Image (spheres, helix red, strand yellow):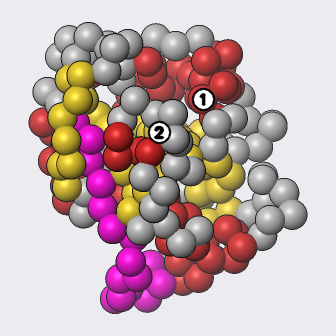
């Protein structure tokens, strides 16, 4: 799937639509017994979590079909790896089920890695329910490795914390290289948190 764009969240984007998309995307997790925040959170909760970092969205067919939020190290995080000053973290990541397996998620993770690299972090980390083996496999194929398994106080399930280095990697495919060049321009533009897009 090539007809999508990745850009920063805009105030014109519908929080309600993003929240509903998160609910649908996390339904399989709930079916496994892992009731993640994204599975039933309110619009207000979605926005609050977005505001903690730099939120990206993927857009296709004139609607948001993916989202993730990138955060700086958090000295107060209950996850030890997130407290490290060289580690950025990724949260509230989902792709609309109707648009999964089309490269949207992989492209968004490439954007996330470049975001971390341009801010001189050494690693990008995330967490997902430990029992979600398919999701963990997807992240492993994107270069993430298991760091630890933790049981957080506000969750009824164990979380697998995964991380990957963000050092520069050669880009072989010409179309991907063009996207990465456009992406660099997007992230270097600090005039507005909603400026720029990556096609």
Q: Position of residue 95 (x, y in %)?
A: 43, 39
Structural distance between the alpha carbons of marks 2 and 1: 8 Å
Classify mark 2: helix, strand or loop: strand
Other residues around mark 2 within 10 Å, as few (<14) / some (14–19) / many (≥20): many
- Left or right of 149? Residue 162 is right
- Report the quarter where the N terminus lies: bottom left
110 vs 10: above or below? below
Reading the chain from its start, which is encountered first: label 2 or label 1? Answer: 1
Q: Taking the image as drawn, is residue 104 in sight?
A: no
Report which residue position mark 1 lands on. 49
Report which residue position mark 2 lands on. 91
- Report the quarter where the C terminus lies: bottom right
Magenta stretch, residue numbers: 160-177
Q: Position of residue 100 (x, y in %)?
A: 35, 43
56 vs 111: above or below? above
In magenta segment, residue 150: no
Between 175 and 72, the one lying in front of the other is 72
Q: Residue at x 55, y 64 (%)?
A: 115
């Amino acid at each position: 799937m090539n007809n999508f764009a990745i850009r920063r969240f805009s105030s014109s984007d519908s929080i309600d639509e993003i929240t509903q998309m998160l609910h649908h995307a996390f339904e399989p997790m709930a079916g496994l017994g892992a009731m993640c925040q994204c599975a039933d959170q309110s619009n207000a909760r979605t926005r609050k979590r977005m505001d903690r970092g730099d939120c990206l969205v993927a857009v296709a067919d004139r609607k948001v079909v993916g989202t993730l939020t990138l955060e700086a190290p958090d000295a107060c995080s209950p996850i030890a790896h997130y407290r490290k000053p060289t580690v950025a973290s990724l949260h509230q990541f989902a792709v609309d089920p109707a648009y999964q397996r089309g490269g949207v998620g992989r492209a968004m993770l490439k954007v996330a890695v470049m975001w971390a690299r341009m801010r001189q972090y050494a690693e990008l980390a995330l967490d997902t329910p430990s029992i979600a083996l398919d999701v963990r496999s997807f992240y492993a194929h994107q270069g993430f490795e298991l760091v630890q398994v933790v049981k957080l106080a506000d969750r009824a399930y164990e979380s697998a914390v995964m991380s990957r280095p963000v050092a520069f990697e050669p880009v072989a495919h010409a179309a991907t290289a063009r996207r990465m060049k456009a992406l660099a321009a997007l992230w270097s533009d600090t005039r507005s948190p909603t400026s720029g897009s990556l096609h």
